[in-house]
């Protein structure tokens, strides 16, 4: 069987279920984690308290779980465009911000004053519409140019929003505080995360997905073979934007505060890319693993000023090491064959280095 | 032998002994209760680490003092204070998460504010959701207090006051300045300051001859300064941050903008301003929440000179504390007084005590309006004279007269 | 009228800084096809080095330029040879991520060393300048422009008139062909990156005299380098010079001369223009398609 492991490109092998025991272990672990995430927080409710159930998680941990779920969505969204299609976007946070601001403006008492559900529903729509519009122009660019253009868009949109009073201006927007809704938001965000993973799975198994992968591997050949590359790329861009925008909308209501710094956060921007790449770009579960591992790491190390600088240096190092030695990400370890032998690493270096 | 005299003497001795045991107050024999845990998310690292470090100093000053006293008195019981810090890296999303962690995992009963308006806004949401009173001294944007939060209180004067003192002072100078150039960063706080200036100036007889805003953190402001120069303003005002204040002042020198007075909302009060500009920093005014020369008479805690001395001792420095330190200590004092007044550690009772608080400390009057912000304390005006900071306005709090007009650049 | 002329002068002068900053960035991108997200960090390292030499040894910032250039040259060579060379043939995106990681590391090491205090280099002649017909022309900025143009000239000469330059251009045109002809790819790559880093260091030295520096002050310069390169184009030194000067002019004039808009829109407009140029004319004004 032709061994595609020699090519420096990503492999979509990681999603086939057949074979590897490691793969099964990973799936079981994720399933158990999901069940825990869904059930454990229920022990913090008043009802559970009256039943005398010990509280397994506290509000702070519920908040962390919600954040992890949010990043699963963001990383999966990036993965659709950057991992599957090979168009590494450096500006996906623009969709997050658009979604967050759409929702915040929609529900604001002094602005549109629409019901909360409408606000959430509008977020993906606005984000996707913007992506489709802008994508038609941007997706003609490739490589570095595409990355920079998307970054430019993200910064530009953030700056525009900061200058318009109706959109909150420099102050930001304050959606109403919803009390006792921590669990609601957790389940909502986890739901969106499951949606994101589900959508990715459907795409990966569809003609559309194969088309995207073809574009990544060799766009000109794909075009010659009859793939409508423009339509496919824009569609992927729009779907990614919709998911990311939806997460933004939920975030706005959950956080009850949105400003340019939060909505168009360059931190979130780079984190979602890191998570997808470290987890395994182009795979189904890569973004999930990346989001869980990295966010837990960040949360574990947050708050301690003595290690703050070292954490950042460590993140930079992690990025460098991943990119050089483990370009296919963690999920590869659970793939068909382990790619993490010394010989494999040396071979991979010889291919990618000069 | 139990003679009557002996019994009387014994009884007397016992009475005195019992009385000594049972006396409350005077620090001697009150009961001690559980520690009070106060949470403080703070920008110890990150883009706001300088100011965050100063704020932390302010908190630490109060902490050392209150525990030296034996703790906060709640209905005759003393409770020592545990102050738990978390470093939010100057990021609002991390700050909110850490605030929640302080409440849920570290059992913080009360919260002290972080540094900066965006982080304060984020943390205020968490405090409000959890019903935990938060007293802050480092986030002056009014937007936070326009949301109707019940549990959030700010001891500092709101943003719109920052340069009003400068205008009041300018109205008293002679030859009287009449024109103002207003340059503002485009972040929330700076814009509030600038808007207040443009609204207030006409009533004091000033004309705004030039006004513009620039992206927060800009370092290339010579274009704006050249524009301002073309209008020959008497006063050049800026609301922004240290980096920009330095850039504007350097550009003013480069372009020979000879304004009669320069006033910056933020920057001049920090030592870095003088270090970066040297002699060029002289004559610069700034609006300040507090200076080491103000003459307030406090009803408790240290007086102004004692505070300055205690600061120099605690941090082994010859520098005076700047207002970031003072406003942070003031926040702690407000919380302490409210707890004492409430006679309880229940969040709602303390919250109510905060709402009705009215007390004067070394920082000035601390009283909150219905929104939770302290509109009752005036801002003072500082000026750098020969490399040193002096308070020049209002007159009853000042220690020096304003040096005006500022000499032209070529004759310095 | 005087105001307009003053703004034009200011714009050109600040444009000189942008030329210096973008020169190294453009070289590395044009030849090696590497978008170096750590470029701003290298600039700031140069700035800190200059400050250190000035504050501790009293060395004038313009005199310490060769030292700073040399130091950054060495740093750049090591970075490329040790790290970036390993991902050259990998998908482009990886070099972006790698240089981003390097950026994180450099900035935080600077934070460890220098804390976040603001530093400034203020030689005795700062603030003084020529006054011609009501227009101020500060000496330091003129010096910066002169240095920037000198650097541009030097890089141009190196590329077009020396053997090393020929090797570099060859690698840029077709690396495998160059290797076939006997060019040591690893060395040339590292050399090119080192020259780019040296340019960044010089830019940093100039910047330290104009603004206060802090470890995170390099980020905006990476973004500005992007815009300059996109505007001017890749592949030619002259493209970067034109791009830098143009950007300086547009930024200064746009900030201040457009009535009603206000300088707060400056960033939004700058990036919108950049995206527009990318979409409409990716090779910029003078560049060749990379």
Image (cartoon, rainbow, N blue to C red):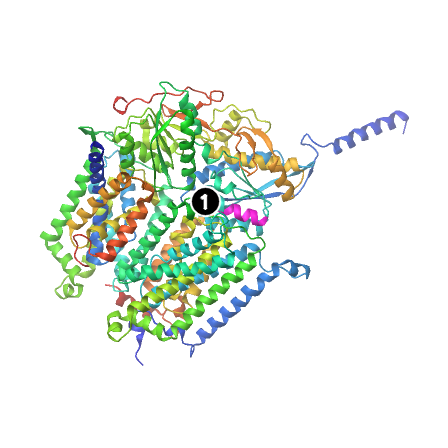
Q: Horizontal and vertical percent for residue C178?
A: 14, 63
| Label 1: which secondary element | helix
Against C56, residue A28 (above or below) is: below
Which quadrant is the C terminus of chain B positioned in? top left
Pinpoint the chain carrying mark 1.
B
Q: Horizontal and vertical percent for residue C218?
A: 31, 46
Q: Residues within 10 Å of mark 1 (few under 14, many from 20)?
A: many
Against B405, residue A69 (above or below) is: below
Residues in magenta, as a range: B122-130
In front here: B83 or A229? A229
At horizontal 49% and vertical 68% (from top left) the residue drawn is: A30
Q: Horizontal and vertical percent for residue B322?
A: 45, 31
Question: In the image, is A111 to the left or to the right of C231?
Answer: right
At horizontal 40% and vertical 52% (from top left) the residue drawn is: A265
Against C255, residue B130 (above or below) is: below
Which quadrant is the N terminus of chain B positioned in? top right
């Amino acid at each position: 069987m032709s061994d595609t492991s020699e090519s420096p490109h990503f492999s979509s092998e990681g999603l086939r279920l057949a074979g590897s025991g490691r793969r099964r272990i990973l799936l079981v672990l994720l399933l158990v984690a999901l069940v825990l995430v869904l059930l454990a927080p229920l022990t913090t409710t008043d009802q559970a308290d009256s039943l005398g159930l010990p509280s397994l998680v506290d509000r702070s941990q519920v908040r962390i779980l919600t954040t992890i779920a949010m990043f699963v969505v963001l990383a999966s969204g990036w993965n659709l465009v950057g991992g599957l299609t090979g168009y590494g976007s450096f500006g996906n946070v623009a969709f997050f911000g658009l979604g967050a601001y759409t929702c915040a403006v929609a529900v604001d008492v002094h602005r549109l004053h629409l019901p909360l559900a409408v606000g959430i529903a509008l977020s993906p729509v606005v984000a996707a519409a913007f992506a489709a519009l802008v994508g038609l122009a941007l997706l003609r660019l490739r490589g570095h140019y595409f990355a920079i253009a998307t970054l430019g868009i993200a910064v530009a949109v953030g700056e525009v929003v900061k200058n318009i009073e109706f959109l909150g201006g420099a102050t930001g927007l304050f959606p109403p505080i919803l009390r006792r809704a921590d669990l609601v938001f957790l389940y909502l965000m986890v739901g969106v995360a499951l949606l994101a993973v589900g959508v990715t799975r459907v795409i990966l198994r569809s003609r559309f997905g194969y088309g995207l992968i073809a574009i990544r591997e060799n766009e000109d050949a794909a075009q010659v073979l009859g793939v409508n590359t423009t339509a496919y790329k824009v569609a992927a861009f729009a779907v990614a934007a919709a998911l990311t925008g939806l997460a933004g909308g939920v975030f706005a209501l959950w956080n009850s505060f949105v400003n340019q710094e939060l909505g168009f956060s360059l931190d979130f921007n780079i984190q979602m890319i890191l998570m997808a790449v470290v987890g395994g770009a182009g795979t189904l579960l890569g973004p999930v693993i990346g989001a869980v591992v990295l966010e837990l790491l960040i949360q574990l190390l947050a708050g301690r000023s003595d290690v703050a600088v070292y954490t950042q240096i460590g993140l930079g190092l992690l990025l460098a090491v991943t990119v050089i030695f483990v370009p296919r990400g963690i999920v590869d370890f659970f793939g068909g064959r382990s790619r993490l032998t010394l010989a494999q690493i040396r071979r991979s270096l010889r291919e990618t280095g000069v | 032998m139990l003679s009557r005299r002996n019994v009387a003497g014994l009884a007397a001795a016992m009475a005195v002994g019992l009385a000594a045991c049972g006396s409350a107050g005077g620090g001697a024999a009150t009961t001690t209760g559980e520690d009070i845990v106060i949470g403080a998310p703070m920008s110890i690292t990150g883009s706001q680490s300088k100011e965050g470090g100063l704020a932390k100093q302010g908190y630490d000053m109060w902490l050392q003092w209150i525990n030296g006293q034996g703790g906060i008195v709640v209905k005759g019981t003393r409770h020592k204070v545990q102050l738990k810090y978390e470093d939010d890296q100057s990021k609002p999303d991390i700050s909110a998460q850490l605030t929640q962690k302080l409440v849920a995992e570290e059992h913080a009963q009360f919260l002290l504010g972080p540094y900066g308006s965006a982080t304060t806004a984020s943390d205020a949401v968490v405090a409000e959701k959890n019903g935990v009173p938060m007293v802050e001294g480092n986030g002056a944007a009014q937007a936070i207090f326009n949301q109707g939060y019940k549990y959030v209180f700010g001891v500092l004067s709101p943003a719109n006051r920052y340069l009003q003192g400068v205008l009041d002072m300018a109205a008293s100078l002679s030859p009287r300045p009449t024109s103002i150039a207003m340059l503002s960063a485009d972040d929330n706080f700076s814009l509030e300051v600038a808007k207040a200036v443009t609204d207030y100036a006409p009533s004091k007889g000033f004309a705004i001859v030039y006004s513009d805003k620039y992206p927060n953190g800009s370092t290339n402001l010579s274009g704006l300064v050249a524009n301002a120069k073309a209008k020959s303003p008497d006063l050049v005002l800026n609301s922004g941050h240290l980096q920009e204040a330095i850039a504007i002042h350097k550009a003013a020198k480069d372009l020979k903008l000879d304004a009669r007075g320069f006033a910056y909302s933020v920057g001049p009060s920090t030592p870095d301003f003088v270090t970066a500009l040297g002699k060029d920093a002289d004559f610069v005014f700034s609006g300040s929440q507090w200076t080491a020369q103000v003459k307030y008479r406090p009803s408790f805690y240290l007086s102004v000179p004692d505070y300055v001395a205690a600061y120099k001792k605690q941090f082994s420095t010859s520098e005076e504390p700047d207002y970031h330190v003072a406003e942070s200590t003031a926040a702690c004092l407000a919380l302490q007084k409210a707890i004492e007044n409430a006679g309880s550690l229940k969040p709602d009772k303390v919250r109510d005590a905060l709402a009705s608080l009215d007390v004067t400390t070394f920082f000035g009057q601390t009283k909150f309006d219905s929104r939770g912000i302290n509109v009752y304390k005036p801002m003072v005006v500082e000026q750098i004279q020969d490399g040193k900071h002096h308070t020049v306005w209002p007159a009853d709090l000042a220690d020096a007269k304003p040096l005006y007009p500022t000499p032209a650049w070529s004759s310095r | 009228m005087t105001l307009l002329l003053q703004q034009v002068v200011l714009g050109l002068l600040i444009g000189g800084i942008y030329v210096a900053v973008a020169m190294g960035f453009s070289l590395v991108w044009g030849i090696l096809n590497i978008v170096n997200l750590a470029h701003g960090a290298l600039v700031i390292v140069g700035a800190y080095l200059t400050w250190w030499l000035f504050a501790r040894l009293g060395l004038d910032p313009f005199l310490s330029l060769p030292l700073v250039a040399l130091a950054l040259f060495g740093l750049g060579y090591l970075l490329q040879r040790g790290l970036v060379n390993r991902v050259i043939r990998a998908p482009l995106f990886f070099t972006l991520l790698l240089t981003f990681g390097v950026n994180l590391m450099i900035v935080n090491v600077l934070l460890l060393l220098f804390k976040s205090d603001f530093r400034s280099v203020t030689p005795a002649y700062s603030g003084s300048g020529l006054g011609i017909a009501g227009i101020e022309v500060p000496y330091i900025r003129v010096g910066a422009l002169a240095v920037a143009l000198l650097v541009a000239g030097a890089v141009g000469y190196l590329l077009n008139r020396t053997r090393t330059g020929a090797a570099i251009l060859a690698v840029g045109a077709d690396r495998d062909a160059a290797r076939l002809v006997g060019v040591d790819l690893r060395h040339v790559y590292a050399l090119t990156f080192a020259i780019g880093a040296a340019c960044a260091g010089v830019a940093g030295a100039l910047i330290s005299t104009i603004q206060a520096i802090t470890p995170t002050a390099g980020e905006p310069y990476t973004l500005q380098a992007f815009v300059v390169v996109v505007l001017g184009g890749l592949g030619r030194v002259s493209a970067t010079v034109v791009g830098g000067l143009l950007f300086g002019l547009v930024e200064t004039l746009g900030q201040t001369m457009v009535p009603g808009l206000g300088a707060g829109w400056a960033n939004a407009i700058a990036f919108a223009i950049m995206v527009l140029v990318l979409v409409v004319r990716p090779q910029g004004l003078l560049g060749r398609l990379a």
